[in-house]
Amino acid sequence: MNTVAPRKRAVAKKPLVPGAVIKKVAIPKSSLAKPPPAPEPKVLTIADLDISKVAGKVITIEEAAKQERITINGYGDSYYNDGDTVKGRTFIITPGGRRQTYPNYNTKKDGLITLGYLNTLQGTNSGSSFFKPDTKVSVRDMTPTEAQRYQTAALITQIRNTQHGLTSGADPEVFAVGGDGRVLPAFEFLGAKGKGVLEYWDGYQAEFSPTAESCLQSLGYRIHECLYRMRALLFAKDPKAKLTTLNTFDIPMERLEKDDPKFVKFGCSPSLSAYSDELNRVVEIDPFTYQTRCAGGHLHFGGTYARKDQADTVQWLDKTLGVISVALFRFWDTPQRRESYGRAGEYRTPPHGLEYRVLSNAWLASPTLYFFVFELARTIIKIARTPALREQFKWDATESEVRDCINYCDVDLALKILKRNEVMRDVLYSTLPNVLGNDTKLQWVRDFVETGAHEYLTNPREVRGWSSNNANYELRYAIGQYNTTTNKIS
């Protein structure tokens, strides 16, 4: 049976003070009125703009002449005015903006005015555009949201325009797997490390050291050369063998017992740690009973930035690139490898500068991953060692959660940290070639990291895509471009 609650009777409010009389007070209509509307944007022509007074203001192209080519000097130099192609487009004039006038050489009037350092609210590159002097624009103040976008875009531009002067190199390790599916020890098809030898055995793992380069495209080709020579020697040993991206294997005890001790012993020297409580951490492991062997993908950098405050730089790499790699490399990385190798904060200080030893060799799975990792690493080093950038780049992550995230390969924690820092995360991604101002490619990078790179690879277990004519040698061709049918990059 449905019942209806009885309606409560209205009860008159009692005076707060005995004997007091409650009176209705009329509220003036003026106090109820809506706030006055924001002032209308001021409309004027490009010729009337005073750059010194509109810096930081939003301008919108309201009315412009049709696009046409205008000659500006007797040498025949000419430019198209942007004209109606930019009608309705919104810009922000930066404090460093400039204006220059070019008269029409043929008519001696109605020339062009170029406005420099225009930032769109979407955060595209600074640049310049040509306008006819009578182009009409409106000018207004930025909204808080626009101000935030502008500050973010300005930081991205500042990062991209800051030179780092770094050289880059690597000495990644990789396992070979024979046609029978078992690890094929590198000492069975490679020689020992020595002067001028770029590919060599490092115990059961193969290792190579491409020549360092200041250009990542050149270093990518050096890596291709090393892999080409290594594969040739591997296939000569076993035509069905492959280089695998899997970075942790257990070696059978019978092999450890019968193989030459020089192949069984660990060849690595102790690492330094960026964290004080691990400075004296020593892991005692008997290589003749410990079956696990791991492969790393260490990044090397040379130059002034690579030699300054190295422990601090490594902490910056950990909290950004290290965390990103946990999400990106979830298919390959395991906590087992980081029990004794590739822990958060691991680095060395070779004569050329800095060796960051935290990452696995997962970036060998594709040239796209290689470019992605090295581009971000160089940018982060630049931010960490440039006071003006460091001050603006606010990344929220505690030391303990960063270390736990890396050491335990905690993907959920990595995604949580990236979500918390989504503004600065997008700043980092937007510094990648051809991503700035392209919302589609920016979203592609987000998905690439948060889904895991393995989802974009045809066979994530193999080292692939390093052919000599591979377009992926330039990241600008790789980001956001893949087979639209298979959704794969290689």
Image (cartoon, rainbow, N blue to C red):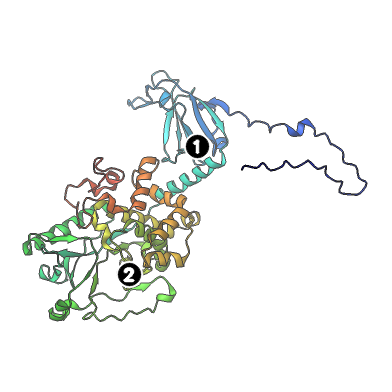
Q: Residue furthest front?
A: 1
295, 386: nearer the viewer:
295
- Residue 163 image position (x, y, % from top left): 38, 53
389, 274: nearer the viewer:
274
Mark 1 or 2, nearer chain start: 1
Query: In this orientation, does residue 385 appear?
Result: no
Q: What residue sits 33% from the left and 46% below the top?
A: 433
**On the rendered structure, is 275 left or right of 58?**
left
- Label 1 sits on what residue type? Ile
Quadrant holding the N terminus: top right
- Residue 379 image position (x, y, % from top left): 38, 55
Residue 357, labelled with which disc? none
**On the rendered structure, is 95 left or right of 378?**
right
Residue 338, labelled with which disc? 2
Q: What residue sits 28% from the left and 48% below the top?
A: 475
Residue 69, image quadrant: top left
Q: CA distance from mark 1 to mark 2?
A: 48 Å
Query: Is 150 situated above or below 86?
Result: below
Q: What residue sits 83% from the left and 44% below the top?
A: 13
**On the rendered structure, is 259 left or right of 385?**
left
- Label 2 sits on what residue type? Arg
- Residue 481 image position (x, y, % from top left): 28, 42
Q: Name the element at disc 1.
A: strand
Q: Residue furthest right?
A: 19
Q: Name the element at disc 2.
A: helix
Residue 317, image quadrant: bottom left
Q: Residue furthest top?
A: 107
- Residue 205 image position (x, y, % from top left): 19, 69
Q: Disc 1 vs disc 2: which is toward the camera?
A: 2
**On the rendered structure, is 74 left or right of 146?**
left
Query: Which residue position holds label 1?
Result: 92
